[in-house]
Amino acid sequence: MSLSLDQVRRIAELSRIELAPGEAERSREQLNGIFGLIEAMQAVDTAGVAPMAHARDLAQRLREDRVSETDRHADFQKVAPEAEAGLYLVPKVIE
């Protein structure tokens, strides 16, 4: 696929990008280069290749899932302006 200058200008207009007169030609060359890379990648035979989540087969290092802090919920409830049944009470803001 190859873009013309008119197509590049139209894309720039739709994207709300202002192109100087010399930029349109340079942008056309860059976009055509990108399209060339895409066509080359699409030409590669990937039949039988399983999709991967990551380029390298890595294992994540996960920490043990355990509580590491003391429960201070009651302390926080004591200093709250209003609390009831373990919940913080706040003023109604939507009528």
Image (cartoon, grey):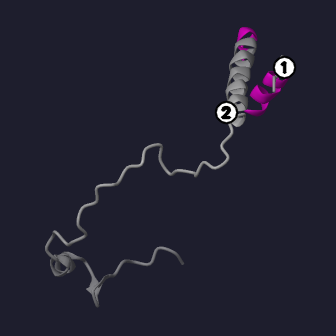
Prevailing SS of the magenta stretch: helix
Q: Of residues 20 and 23, which is closer to you in this image?
A: 23
Q: Of residues 56 and 27, which is closer to you in this image?
A: 56
- Which residue carries the number 1 mark? 4
Q: Residue at x 43, y 44 (%)?
A: 56
Question: For this view, does 54 lie left or right of residue 20?
Answer: left
Q: Residue at x 35, y 54 (%)?
A: 59
Regarding residue 17, the answer to whether it shows in the image is no
- Which residue carries the number 2 mark? 41
Question: In which quadrant will I find the C terminus?
Answer: bottom right
CB-based contact (under 8 Å), mark 1 and mark 2:
no
Question: Magenta residues?
Answer: 6-23
Which residue lies most toward the top here? 22
- Residue 32 rendering spot, x and y as whole percentages: 74, 21
Question: In which quadrant will I find the N terminus?
Answer: top right
Asked whether residue 15 is drawn in magenta, I would say yes
Which residue lies most toward the front here? 48
Mark toward the start of the polypeptide (1 vs 2):
1
Give the label, 1 or 2, closer to the camera. 2
Q: Residue at x 69, y 31 (%)?
A: 38
Regarding residue 8, the answer to whether it shows in the image is yes
- Residue 65 vertical placement versus 30 (above, below): below
Question: For this view, does 8 lie left or right of residue 44?
Answer: right
Q: Amino acid at mark 2?
A: Met
Which element is circle 1 on? loop
- Residue 55 vertical placement versus 80 (above, below): above
Asked whether residue 42 is drawn in magenta, I would say no
Q: Residue at x 81, y 23 (%)?
A: 2
Classed neighbour count for the residue bearing mark 1: other residues with Cα under 10 Å, few (<14), some (14–19), many (≥20): few
- Residue 71 vertical placement versus 68 (above, below): below
Classed neighbour count for the residue bearing mark 2: other residues with Cα under 10 Å, few (<14), some (14–19), many (≥20): few
Quadrant of res 13: top right
